[in-house]
Amino acid sequence: MARPREFEESAVLDAAMLCFWEQGFEATTVKHLVARTGLTAASLYNAFGDKRTLYQRTLDRYVESSVASRIRRCEAMPPLAALAAFFEDIVTRSLSDADCKGCMLVNAALDTAPHDPQFRTAVADALIRVEAFFLGCVEAGQAGGVISTRLPATQLAQHLLAVLLGIRVLARIRPERELLEGLVAPTMLLLDPAPFADS
């Protein structure tokens, strides 16, 4: 008769997620995971499979607990307020990240996605989800007259995605409020439906 698991799966996934988040997939060893989770290597393999499978589980968990959760919170707001709140949260999280871990999803885009088609697809799907949120906000805001129609909604959504990625990468090496807020300010101005003042 198989012995029941003597650990809380969610707690182990959270510990493994932090390990991968801090060190990246390649630099994280099974020894690191054992030390962080408190499980033996055999228990980790029996419960989650190999390191690659465990990394995928933790990346999925990060996307749902961080990225998707933020989107759900902001979707309940009016379009322009939703975008402002989204980026305010990103800047706040980036500045409060004492270890400069950055965003695990963005880290995965740089660390694993270029070399692994499965991870590339997983990261792309998550970023498409973010872009779709931006697009929904922009389209609703343009329809309601609170977001500029000077550019197509798709281009504005793509621009917002690029600003998000820029903030998350820059924050790892220069977590400076003035810099990060300086990236957001012109972006919000670009969304303003009022015409630009004549130069």
Image (cartoon, rainbow, N blue to C red):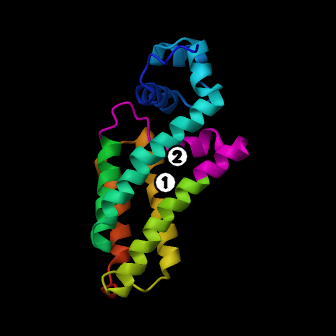
- The x, y position of residue 12, in whole percent, is 45, 24
Decide: few, some or many residues near mark 2? Use Cα within 10 Å; few <14, some 14-19, many ≥20: some
| Numbered label attached to residue 106 | 2
Q: Is residue 22 visible?
A: yes
Q: What type is the residue that disc 1 sits on?
A: Leu
Q: Is residue 49 above or below residue 114?
A: above
Q: Earlier in the sequence, mark 1 or mark 2?
A: 2
| Numbered label attached to residue 62 | none
Within the image, what quadrant is residue 41 found in? top right
Does the magenta-highlighted stretch encompass residue 179?
no
- Disc 1 marks which residue? 165
Helix, strand or loop under label 2 = helix
Highlighted range, magenta: 96-123
- The x, y position of residue 85, in whole percent, is 28, 60
Within the image, what quadrant is residue 108 found in? top right
Q: Nearer the viewer, residue 102 or 187?
A: 102
Q: What type is the residue that disc 2 sits on?
A: Val
